[in-house]
Image: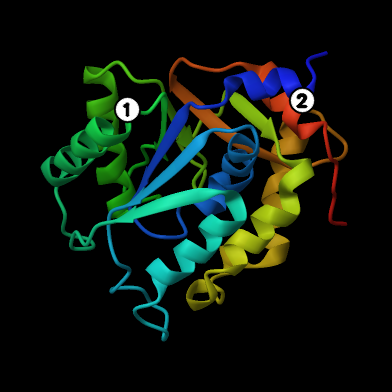
Amino acid sequence: MNTYSDANNFGQQTVLTIYAHADDEVLPAAGTLSLMSKAGWNVRCLILTDGSLSSSSIKGTRHQEAEEAGKIIGASYEFYALEECNFSTQAVIKVAEEAIGRWQPDLIITHAPQPEKYGHRDHEVCAIAVSNVATRKNIPLWYSAPPVFLRGFEPNFFVDITSVIEEKVAAIGCYESEINKAFMQLDAILVLSRFWARELGQKDGYFEAFEISRQWVDASFFAAIANTNKQVIN
């Protein structure tokens, strides 16, 4: 089995996440991003909107909350202010291309394409645009699991985040303005993470699920990291 030092050989690579709203990045992928950061990856999170149309009674804090989450998972952020529920695929393509030019990512992670009737309009537009750019630029691409309504999402890769489940919970907890939403609650976070474990036939542990659209994966990298420091919340 690979050791932790073996996994560190994957360092100095860059993962770029592109999501519509701040908190979209931590719900499906905080554990995986934390593992990457611990292994020396540059973790860059790009957020397209400012959350001004959030249903929360607390306004204007999403970017600050994201920065706090980033400190926990080892990520740096860049924010845009595209108009929620009204931005175009062309606008996202332009933003994504500019970010790729700056950061030269080895991997991109974004929303899974999902019909609007099952998900959020902004997520769907983001997914379509980012997929377009990743395909044209030949960059590996992963889709992360939707927080609710998993219809249309077909995961083919799972990351054991048991060793960093506390970091995931803490990162999501930074979004206090969104905490009243059902899928932000602790029990929902743990249940979904355990659900993905059950999908693999695992009795214990916590996992995150991804659909690999464009291939790039070395499962031994994640196994080496995840096995270094098991911490489980019961």
The image quadrant that residue 110 belongs to is: top left
The residue depicted at 33 percent of the width and 43 percent of the height is 115
- Pick the residue in front: 123 or 78: 78
The residue depicted at 23 percent of the width and 63 percent of the height is 84
Q: Residues within 10 Å of mark 2 (few under 14, many from 20)?
A: some
The CA span between labels 1 and 2 is 25 Å
Left or right of 46? Residue 186 is right
Residue under pointer 1: 104
State the residue lying farthest toward the bottom. 57
Q: Earlier in the sequence, mark 1 or mark 2?
A: 2
Q: How is the image coloured?
A: rainbow
Q: Secondary structure at mark 1?
A: loop
The image quadrant that residue 224 belongs to is: top right
**Where residue 226 appears, x then y in whole percent?**
76, 33
Look at label 1 and name its amino acid. Gln
Q: Residues within 10 Å of mark 1 (few under 14, many from 20)?
A: some
Q: Are marks 1 and 2 in contact (CB under 8 Å)?
A: no
The residue depicted at 82 percent of the width and 33 percent of the height is 228
**Where residue 122 appears, x then y in whole percent?**
28, 53
**Residue 199: assigned label:** none
Quadrant of the drawing holding the N terminus: top right
- Pick the residue in front: 225 or 110: 225
Left or right of 114? Residue 87 is left
**Where residue 99 appears, x then y in whole percent?**
26, 39
Q: From the viewer's perspective, is residue 138 above or below residue 141?
A: above
Residue under pointer 2: 4
**Where residue 109 appears, x then y in whole percent?**
43, 35
The residue depicted at 52 percent of the width and 70 percent of the height is 175
Left or right of 196? Residue 124 is left
Look at label 2 and name its amino acid. Tyr
Is residue 230 visible in the rendered image? The answer is yes
